[in-house]
Image (cartoon, rainbow, N blue to C red):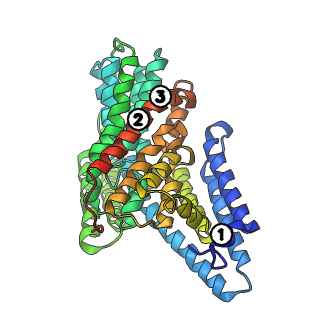
Amino acid sequence: MAGVGGEAASTGTPLGMAALAAFAVACLLVALEDHIGLRKSKPMLLAATAIWGAIAWAAQGDPQRAQAVSAAFERSFLEFSELFFFLVASTAFVEALAERGVFDVLRVALIRRGWSWRGLFWITGALAFALSSVLNNMTTALVMAAVVLALGAGQPRFVAMACINIVVAANAGGAWCAFGDVTTLMVWQAGHAGFFDFFALLPPALVSWLLPAALMHPALPSGQPQAAACTAHCKPGTLAMVVVFALTIALTVACVQLLALPPMFGMLAGLALLQMLSWRIGRREATSTAADVPAEPHDIFRLLARNDWDTLLFFGGVLLAVGGLAELGWIELLAASTYGQMPPALATSLLGASSALIDNIPVMSAVLHMAPPLDRSGWLLATLACGVGGSLLSIGSAAGIALMGVARGSYTFTRHLRWSWAIALGYVASVALHLLFALPHGSAP
């Protein structure tokens, strides 16, 4: 990747060093978000715009260089736009299903079953693994954590261990489906693997959760929580909304496979269907006199306002910042020191483990900018490594950061760190399993 001046040597210039420092400071502030109260999108977007502004300023006076910088920024912004609109559509479905009461019904059903502490540990982990394949890992983790917190009063050890298990399971579950995690989506959108190729990651992803969970099991408290008397029900239109969500997933896959359109296209089509359904539900509620109808009729735009815009803008800042570092030659330098010095599988595994400190989104973005000569199996390994590598520390994924906020005092960085050795064993085992049964060489469809 050429720098501003057409050479990777831009990394050694004051501009290159300042850009790297700006990105490092932004990453540090993101890691400290829970302590200083500064939302993560703010420092990352500021760093991204500062990096690109400095690059453009340095290119002034040379029309050819200025045009190349403008084209490079447009490419980075297009990457962000595709990811942004995909996530807006998918999170709109999550908010709509939550508003209809789907997740409340799930939570109440688990609470009323009277599971033991150990049974609850396993069932919440299994559900986190399954749900995160179609929902984002942070939403899945928050839904499962609500069950744990509702029953875990007076059992801080159980809450901490269950939250660790949920984080690991949600990150692992998101690694084997194109819809499950942002890093997986990035690889799919880049065309390095087809939708069904990711299913090959199911066995190693499952191992990355089951092994640490099994090692944690003996340390769980015995007995069971007291069953709580609570109720919940789904609102009218829930079934139709679930059908539209399933249709959207099928439509997205079909558009990619048959029309060679980006996944964003299918999700936007699904969002349009959701809007039409929400309009119908809203009109029905507005004219209904039933006692259980809410005071404010169903409104899709009010639900869209609930989206986690901070996280969406954070992703944009990361992609733009990494794109700027790539333009300066930093990604090429990183590629030379990893893929240029060691076997590709080892380099990918180490980069995946580094996502525990840096976050998996910038790591995957950097790997995509490196464009190492990986076959389909190699890109699947990168997806697996970045997807589950963030579980090694509580700050390595959106799921872990979110649970540190909602389970403050029970689930902490240090309590997660106590079981990092078990999670690391699961990480190594999953990578080894993938390499053992790697897909044959070939290009992605």
Residue 67 visible in the picture: yes
Specify the farthest residue to the top.
223
In the image, which disc is placed on residue 17? none
Q: CA distance from mark 2 to mark 1?
A: 40 Å
In this rendering, which labeled residue sits more in front, label 2 or label 1?
Answer: 2
Q: Give above or below for 45 relative to 113.
A: below
**Residue indicated by mark 1:** 52
Q: Residue 420 in the image: x percent, y percent? A: 48, 32
Secondary structure under tag 3 reads: loop
**What quarter of the picture does the C terminus occupy?**
bottom left
Q: CA distance from mark 3 to mark 2?
A: 10 Å
Q: Residue 308 in the image: x percent, y percent? A: 50, 49
Secondary structure under tag 2 reads: helix
Q: Residue 291 in the image: x percent, y percent? A: 32, 36
Specify the farthest residue to the right.
14
Identify the image quadrant of residue 62: bottom right
| Of residues 397 and 140, the one drawn nearer to the viewer in this rendering | 397
Secondary structure under tag 1 reads: helix
Q: Looking at the image, tell me whether mark 3 or mark 1 is earlier in sequence order.
A: 1
* Amino acid marked by disc 1: Trp
Q: Residue at left 62%, top 78%?
A: 69
Q: Residue at left 67%, top 79%?
A: 5
Q: Residue 387 in the image: x percent, y percent? A: 42, 48
* Amino acid marked by disc 3: Trp
Q: Residues within 10 Å of mark 2 (few under 14, many from 20)?
A: some
Identify the image quadrant of residue 149: top left
- Left/right placement of residue 189 relative to residue 321 reads left
**Residue indicated by mark 2:** 425
